[in-house]
Amino acid sequence: MNRFDRLPRASTIFKVVLLVVAVVVITLASFLIGGNIDWLLPLAGSAEAKSVDQLFRFLAIVGTMITLAIVALLVYSGFAFKRAPDDYSDGPPIEGSLQLEILWTILPIVLVTFLGVYSYDVYLKLIRSNPQTGASHHLGPQSQLREVAQVTDSPELGPKREGQAELTVAVESVQWAWVFTYPQSGGLTTAELHLPVNRPVVLKMTAKDVIHGFWVPEFRLKQDIIPGRTTEIRLLPDRVGEYVLHCTQLCGTYHGAMRATVFVQTAAEFEKWRTTQVAVGGRDAAVATVVDPAPLLTPLRSAQTAQLVKHFQPQPNRGSE
Amino acid sequence: MVDVSASQTGSNRATGDWRRYFTFNTDHKVIGIQYLVTAFTFYLIGGLQAMIIRAELATPEANVVSQDAYNGLFTLHATIMIFLWIIPMSAGLGNYLVPLMIGARDMAFPRLNAASFWLIPPAGLVLLSCYLVPSGPPQAGWWSYPPLSLQAIQVGEQTVFNYGQSLWCIGVGILGISSILAAVNFIATILAMRTEGMTLFRMPIFIWNTLVTSVITLLGVPILTAAVVLLWSDLALGTGFFDPARGGDPVVYQHMFWFYSHPAVYIMILPAMGAVSEILPTFARKPLFGYRVVAISTVAIGVIGFTVWAHHMFTSGTPDWLRLFFMITSMAIAVPTGIKVFNWVATIWGGKLWLTTPMLFAMGFVGMFVAGGVTGVMLASVPVDIHVSNTYFVVAHLHYVLFGGSVLGLYAAVYYWFPKMTGRFLNETLGKVHFWTTIIGLNLAFLPMHQVGLLGMPRRVAEYLPQFTFLNQIVSLGAAVLGISTLPFLLNVLISWLAGTQAESDPWRSHGLEWTVSSPPPLENFGQLPVITAGPYEYGIVGKGAGPEDPSEAQTSSTRGDT
Ligand code: HEM
Ligand SMILES: [Cu+2]
Ligand SMILES: [Cu+2]
């Protein structure tokens, strides 16, 4: 027995090196994605968005790792276990392994339990200010969820805002336009959504004809708007900027073009915009129905809404700048 | 694994008359081929629509087709791909293989079997005839959510009745009936017609998957059919089940629709998983790792699959408790799914791989399916889904599972069983060209969709913001590659069916029961019914055909296989 017998064989060394390289590459790639989720997600524009992004980052890292690991195992097998050209013999008759089965049953259970708890926690943060009753009428307006709804100033959602009332905006969706009404400003009606930064907002959303969807990617919030009910979304925009509101529920011919511009402005700019708009008479008598955020009992047919939309051509003056 | 008397192989060859494929034939093998060819024809139509869709999305403006035509295109594309391609294709494989794999001479109800096939071509024609009616095709997506699906259609200055949507309801209704009939037949056949010794835990995994798929179909489709009937009644008879303008509730439709359509994703993936579970052991020359665990996971997927439907409604009119409940169940279903993946990898590990085309497709299936499963878990997480629901991220997810999963699995199955069905091999070179162009095209087309969705592009739009142009052009390029990748396959099937290399009864040296009969199998399959004494994956055991050195190989016919 000479001393070379104790040294690992070249092929073993190669395998170990390959394994180390694979682990390093897969880990790096996963964290590269996790560390650069701004490639994947637009900049967060609401207090609600931050914890969603953390959760997404975690899922993206774990997901990339799992996918790359399985693909790497498959590719490695393709090279390492390929049979020799004339080899028609079989592989080893291994039928399974109880230990391995237990291992890879427990591993995913632990992982999804963790993901479940984590997601649950993030969702509780979201609904602390933004509960969805799904318009379940049996819960009733006095239900506990409604009470929580008033606590927009949860500490998770940023600094406390003393004595600042929420801003209510009625959001109307019709085929294929958005109409925003500010009841606290005498029913000012616009085709753009202007929101002051760092002030809690309540959007009371209704649909006139078919289901539409409210989505501003930067806010990370999405909610279908179902005709016949008022659906609420609460949020705290916390970054000044110009965003796009997309309709996300197929709503007919011009669904893809059903967008509106969203301006998140400083309090002073918002105030300036608001007063100029009220001065030019933003309230249009012809659309007085729009002011009322209560749902229509009878949603309109497409021809009727087409009539209505004509009143809401986007206004030329964009905000206060 | 089977006692085969020499007399029953090769004797009694089925008559080769091609005309029987156009008749109300009751032979399960004829019906199987009828299903496969019909489904593939619809696949070509659905694929052509996908090409137009991607041409439209190559630029941000709506310029190739009108917006209405675009909405019609994706509605029919999805409907055809799901109801006329993947589901009937899987049913076709099942029809061909189930009796052969369990040792039966035919399905339990041969006439019912023919009837369930013959419902499909008319249903497909009803659906496609929507291009001939004044309102044009349905435009409400394959979900057909009311009230959009109930709206009259604006044609020029006129408002016309939504004939397209009516035809959609009728077509989907007929296809549902066809599915139910086929499911009853599969369940009866598998439970009652297994040959002696074919115990439940000796059934091939493909049979387990077909069984679970059929049970899901039987429990789910009636709900879909009910939803579609009520929808049609709202549309055509003026009732108000789902129409809020008449006091109905559209969210009820959503629940009914997804109560079927979530389990339907398992109807679409389980048969492919079953095929892959047959192919991997054959070409790895190793037993399927953890056979019982894989079988039980299949059942678990079927059961849990019925408890997750509302994850498609996380942003709809659903209360918080419901969202959280369905988040937990949706995550739970990843566990049996993950277990299957690990067992497939372990089956390959340490084997002696024959890298044939079916093996490549099967391994591709495992890799691509994992990518789709992982994004599925991300979607199950409510806070993340609220951001990505109804965006291109979901489109990416569903194509990784449906194309990367189901379609690759079905292709693997075609390459694998083609010699059995026709007595001829598919060409390996064309097969490999097909595989690699498919893998490249698929990732080029569907990977960037994740990003474009996360960044803010909703789905089902004919126009999008200019900043998404570059990513969309890569996607469209990938789609073109995918379109082209179908050509070598088509060519291959046409040439090989007529003039391919002749195949023996067991060209892959598989241990499955279907390989003990001649290729193509004789009428009635088995002269004398075989008696089963062992499981289907006994590779590598000396004395059971473990290779040339094994003395038991002496009696086995000659072998063949490419690498
Ligand atoms: C790991 C298991 C899976 C999970 C947790 C999962 C989860 C989800 C979720 C939550 C959605 C809804 C996203 C949304 O609309 O907001 C979705 C959509 C979808 N999934 Fe999966 N999925 C899984 C596997 C599959 C499989 C195996 C298939 C099919 C073979 C599939 C096909 C689809 C389809 C077709 C859609 C889109 C439906 C539509 O919106 O048109 N999924 N999935
Ligand atoms: Cu829309
Ligand atoms: Cu689902």
Image (tube, rainbow, N blue to C red):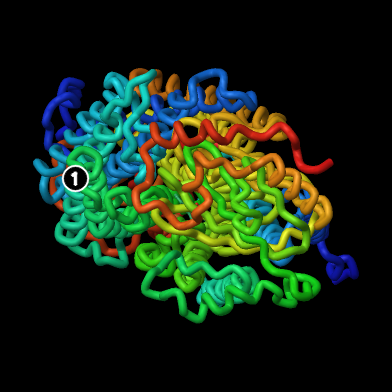
- Helix, strand, or loop for circle 1? helix
Residue at point 37%, 26% (across, down): B154
Asked if B552 appears above or below A249 in the picture, the reply is: below
| Residue type at tag 1 | Ile
- The residue sitting at 54% across, 34% down in the picture is A311
**Left/right of residue A80 with respect to residue A289 in the rendered view:** right
Quick check: B79 left or right of B51?
A: left
Q: Position of residue B235 (x, y in %)?
A: 25, 40
Residue A274 % position (x, y):
73, 49
Camera-side residue of B240 and B99 = B240
Left or right: residue B257 compared with residue A49: left
Residue A35 in which image quadrant: bottom right
Q: Position of residue B212 (x, y in %)?
A: 31, 59
- Along the line of sight, the residue nearer the viewer: A131 or B220: A131
Indicate the position of residue B483 as horizontal and vertical percent values.
52, 25
Q: Which residue is mark 1?
A: B177
Q: As displayed, is residue B500 above or below residue B196?
A: above
Name the image quarter holding the C terminus of chain B: top right
The answer to whether B23 is drawn above or below residue A191 in the figure is above
Q: Chain of mark 1?
A: B
